[in-house]
Image (cartoon, grey):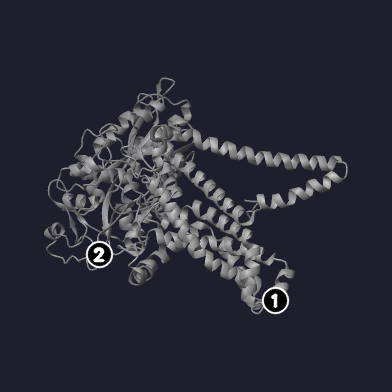
């Protein structure tokens, strides 16, 4: 709720003082040739993770083109996919692209298209007396050790080895994770699977997993609060929540061996390392590169390739065209990362493939 | 839940209507009443079927092994209900253990003690207030206030005094069976008190007077006349409380720790059937996963029915008469 409000205000402020901050947009797609959409009232449903960004961006788009209103319901990726399958919404959103079985339920993978809407990263937040934000250094090995339940105390030798500068107490580590199915959990378990073969074989990746240790809380906000009020707690939380609620977060060692504090810029840096990223190759965790934030991931939008209603379809591709180009400016304010150029190009190619009655809907040639 | 009242009213209705010929108004009324009764049966049947059909993929895959499996692994699509069944029963049991003595005390005070009449109004008001608080608000309070209190004060105290019992061992985070049980106790107390108070008040005055006239003290009268007479009604109050405790979702989810775990320690985190469903249904992708959640729903319904039947049998044995739920 608080976050949604911040999102709305953030959007309004950016709009009021708006210039042409075209963060990471393709240079050939300035706002000059932004298409004017036909009037339409669009509905979408899906992931909670990108909701604050979508709310702010769709609000701003409505200010720009009042004939287009967008109602996005953050009911969860699974419910969003089901509603799109039943065609009760115009578009769906999910942090994990469609599985082939899900695409088949929509008529086959050639009937539905997916594009990246935004990019986010996760932090490891902790509650440790006397250890401030950024002071705790974690490596892929210690993170996996903690979440596998093998590192049980804060003064474990493995943790001490990386943190010679601070005094770690003789205290139980209290792991907190998401209890509800979430893209956040998918990205984190994807990261653990890529850095730890033991995690990959014992637990694996998924929106819900069988946690070897710890307690569950429902939603980012509850995880954040549980960590804040439980001494010795650690958990993975979206960057935006960490920054908005002033939580202490750990510095993470990335694949290149650098310790980085997770940031939106770090997520973009990580995403740039995967030039060929697409819905079928969507994982960008444990990225190489000096500044890469290691626990990052895209969030996806999905719509039918052939739109039954031409006006609605046109309004939707125009909206998404704006969202992945100019609209990205609303992402950074809310601590989401701007899409890298390669993904913007991918998205635009996807939008161009959307048709209605055989006619391409996007009127932009770039 | 309201069969009790219906059971009491219905025979009277039939008896009077048989004494004189049916006029059209009576007939209409009877048709409406029968229709309403049939509708309830229909809704219940449709409900069970609607749970059963989506649960089928999980039922065919896991069968009855679902009830004894401790695995809950969405990644490998392996599901078992035992930890959630255990958590549901344990938290409800804790709730009743706490709520029953407190509830009886309060009900007796409200119904019996005439000396502190001034206090009755505020107490009744407090009970109604407590009953009216939405569970999510109680959950919020428990999450922010009760869990730190349990972790820093109650749990260490229990560990110190009763730590030799397996129930009070291990590290306490404030989240877990005990905290969830306490929250449930608070939530079922209003039902327990209000219903018990009413059945205790319904004990005929003549019986009390007879007991007192025979020289029994107040306490003896309550113990050997009032409570035995009200036993069936009190059982009903406990049953309704149990029903509420078994099904309560949001407040429990906020404090139980949401971990499919079976542990003797009440400080341990756990999971309950409604909590699993509430947590996971939005992202439960795939027929078997979603089916497993519906299967959990069926299990919850079955547990509720079994508990009700057991309690009814118990009452039958004691009283030899058909019990009324409320």
Residue A334 rendering spot, x and y as whole percentages: 34, 51
Q: Residue at x 49, y 33 (%)?
A: B53
Q: Disc 1 on helix, strand or loop?
A: helix
- Depth check, front residue: B13 or A138: B13
The quarter of the picture where residue B257 lies is bottom left
The quarter of the picture where residue B36 lies is top right
- Depth check, front residue: A9 or A150: A150
**Is A54 situated above or below A261?**
above
- Depth check, front residue: B173 or A313: B173
Residue A44 badge:
none
Q: Disc 2 on helix, strand or loop?
A: loop
- Depth check, front residue: B27 or A254: B27
Neighbourhood count class around disc 1 (C-alpha, 10 Å): few under 14, some 14–19, many 20 upward: some
**Is B91 situated above or below A319?**
below
The quarter of the rendered structure image containing the N terminus of chain A is bottom left
Q: Which residue is mark 2?
A: A128
Q: Is residue A288 visible?
A: yes
Residue B278 rendering spot, x and y as whole percentages: 44, 47
Q: Which residue is mark 1?
A: B212
């Amino acid at each position: 709720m608080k976050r949604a409000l911040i999102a709305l205000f953030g959007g309004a402020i950016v709009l009021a003082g708006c210039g042409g901050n075209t963060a990471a947009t393709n240079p050939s797609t300035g706002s000059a040739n932004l298409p004017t959409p036909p009037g339409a009232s669009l509905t979408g449903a899906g992931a909670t993770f990108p909701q604050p960004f979508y709310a702010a961006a769709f609000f701003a788009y409505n200010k720009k083109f009042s004939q287009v209103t967008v109602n996005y319901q953050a009911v969860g990726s699974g419910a969003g996919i089901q509603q799109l399958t039943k065609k009760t919404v115009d578009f769906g959103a999910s942090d994990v692209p469609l599985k082939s079985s899900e695409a088949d339920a929509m008529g086959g993978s050639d009937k539905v298209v997916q594009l990246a809407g935004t990019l986010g990263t996760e932090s490891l937040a902790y509650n440790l007396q006397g250890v401030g934000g950024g002071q705790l250094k974690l490596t892929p090995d210690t993170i996996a050790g903690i979440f596998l339940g093998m590192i049980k105390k804060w003064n474990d030798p493995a943790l001490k080895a990386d943190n010679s500068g601070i005094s770690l107490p003789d205290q139980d580590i209290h792991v907190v994770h998401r209890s509800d199915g979430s893209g956040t959990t998918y990205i984190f378990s994807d990261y653990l699977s890529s850095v730890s073969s033991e995690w990959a074989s014992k637990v694996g990746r998924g929106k819900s997993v069988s946690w070897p240790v710890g307690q569950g809380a429902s939603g980012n906000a509850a995880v954040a609060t549980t960590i804040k009020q439980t001494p010795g707690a650690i958990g993975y939380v979206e960057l935006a929540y960490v920054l908005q609620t002033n939580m202490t977060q750990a510095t993470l060692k990335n694949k290149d061996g650098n310790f980085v504090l997770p940031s939106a810029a770090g997520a973009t840096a990580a995403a740039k390392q995967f030039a060929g990223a697409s819905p079928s190759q969507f994982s960008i965790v444990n990225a190489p590169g000096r500044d890469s934030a290691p626990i990052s991931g895209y969030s996806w939008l999905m719509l039918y390739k052939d739109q039954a209603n031409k006006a609605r379809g046109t309004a939707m591709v125009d909206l998404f065209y704006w969202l992945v180009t100019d609209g990205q400016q609303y992402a950074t304010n809310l601590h989401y990362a701007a899409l890298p150029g390669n993904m913007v190009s991918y998205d635009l190619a996807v939008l161009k493939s959307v048709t209605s009655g055989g006619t391409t809907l996007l009127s932009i040639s770039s | 839940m309201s069969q009790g009242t219906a059971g009491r009213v219905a025979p009277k209705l039939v008896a009077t209507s048989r004494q004189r010929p049916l006029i059209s108004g009576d007939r209409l009324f009877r048709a409406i009443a029968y229709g309403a009764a049939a509708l309830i049966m229909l809704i219940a049947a449709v409900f069970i079927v609607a749970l059963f059909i989506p649960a089928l993929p999980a039922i065919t895959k896991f069968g009855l092994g679902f009830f004894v499996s401790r695995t809950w692994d969405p990644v490998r699509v392996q599901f078992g209900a035992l930890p959630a069944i255990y958590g549901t029963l344990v938290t409800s049991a804790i709730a009743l253990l706490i709520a029953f003595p407190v509830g009886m005390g309060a009900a007796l005070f409200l119904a019996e003690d005439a000396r502190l009449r001034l206090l009755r109004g505020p107490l009744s008001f407090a009970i109604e207030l407590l009953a009216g608080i939405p569970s999510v608000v109680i959950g919020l309070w428990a999450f922010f206030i009760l869990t730190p209190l349990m972790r820093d004060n109650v749990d260490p105290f229990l560990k110190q005094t009763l730590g030799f019992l397996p129930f009070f061992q291990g590290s306490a985070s404030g989240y877990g069976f005990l905290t969830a049980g306490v929250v449930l106790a608070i939530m079922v107390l209003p039902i327990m008190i209000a219903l018990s108070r009413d059945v205790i008040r319904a004990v005929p005055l003549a019986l009390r007077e007879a007991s007192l006239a025979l020289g029994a003290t107040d306490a003896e009268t309550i113990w050997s006349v009032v409570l035995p007479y009200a036993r069936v009604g009190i059982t009903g109050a406990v049953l309704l409380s149990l029903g509420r405790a078994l099904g309560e979702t949001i407040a429990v989810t906020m404090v139980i720790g949401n971990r499919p775990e079976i542990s003797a320690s009440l400080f341990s985190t756990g999971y309950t059937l409604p909590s699993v469903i509430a947590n996971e249904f939005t992202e439960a992708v795939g027929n078997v996963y979603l089916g497993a959640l519906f299967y959990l729903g069926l299990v919850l319904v079955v547990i509720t029915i079994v508990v009700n039947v057991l309690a009814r049998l118990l009452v039958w044995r004691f009283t030899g008469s058909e019990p009324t739920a409320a």
